Amino acid sequence: MLWVLAFAALAVAGGGLFSCGRGGGPDLGPNRVVTATVTRVVDGDTVKVRIGHRRETVRYIGMDTPETVKPHTPVQCFGKAASAYNRRLVAGQPVQLRVGAEPRDRYGRLLAYVYRRRDGLFVNAVLVRDGYATTLTIPPNDAHAAQLARLERSARRAGRGLWRACT
């Protein structure tokens, strides 16, 4: 019984030692804004980041790119191009993450709108605008759904990116 009390005291004194999250650092709850550095581009819509001492996988909200690394799924048309474009946009870059109203998906990935710190570039929107991604709206993470839908219609009409290569 004494060890239970000691453990409880440590938890309280630890100031969040046993809080949710990975490795401490800022709160990554709904609608938070945090600064991170992209450490690896996984594919066109997923990156690995460092937030302080914490490491996270971030899935971009509101859009989807063709698959390149999904198990048991062949590489899809324009997937490698989308991954390469995302890499050019954010690899090694400081970014600002605007966490979604629902902060994590079923795989534990952080869901966020991603902005490049040096110039405020809205990465999710650029990928859709330039034809590297399609829209994917999953409420409640739909704050930019209308904007992304307009950008997708424009890219499709202009035959940009996957709209030309994959039809």
Image (cartoon, rainbow, N blue to C red):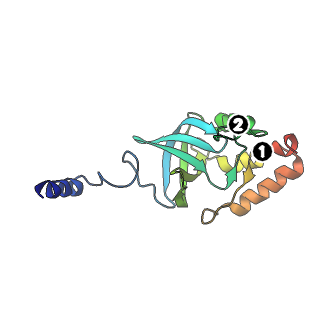
| Residue highlighted by disc 2 | 85
Image spot of residue 106 (x, y percent): 54, 55
Q: Distance between the residues labelled 1 and 2?
A: 10 Å
- Residue farthest left in this picture: 2
The type of residue carrying mark 2 is Tyr
- Asked whether disc 1 touches disc 2, contact meaning CB atoms under 8 Å apart, the reply is yes
Q: Which residue is drawn at 40% across and 51% down?
A: 21
Q: Is residue 90 visible?
A: no
- From the viewer's perspective, tell me whether residue 12 is left or right of residue 124: left
| Image position, residue 125 (x, y; %) | 70, 51
Residue in view at x 67 percent, y 60 percent = 144
Q: Which amino acid does label 1 sit on?
A: Asp
Residue 31 at least partly seen: yes
Name the residue: 61% across, 43% down. 46
| Residue 27, position as x, y percentages in the image | 41, 55
Secondary element under disc 2, as helix, strand or loop, is helix
Picture quarter with the N terminus? bottom left
Residue 130's label in the rendered image is: 1
Q: Is mark 1 on a helix, strand or loop?
A: loop
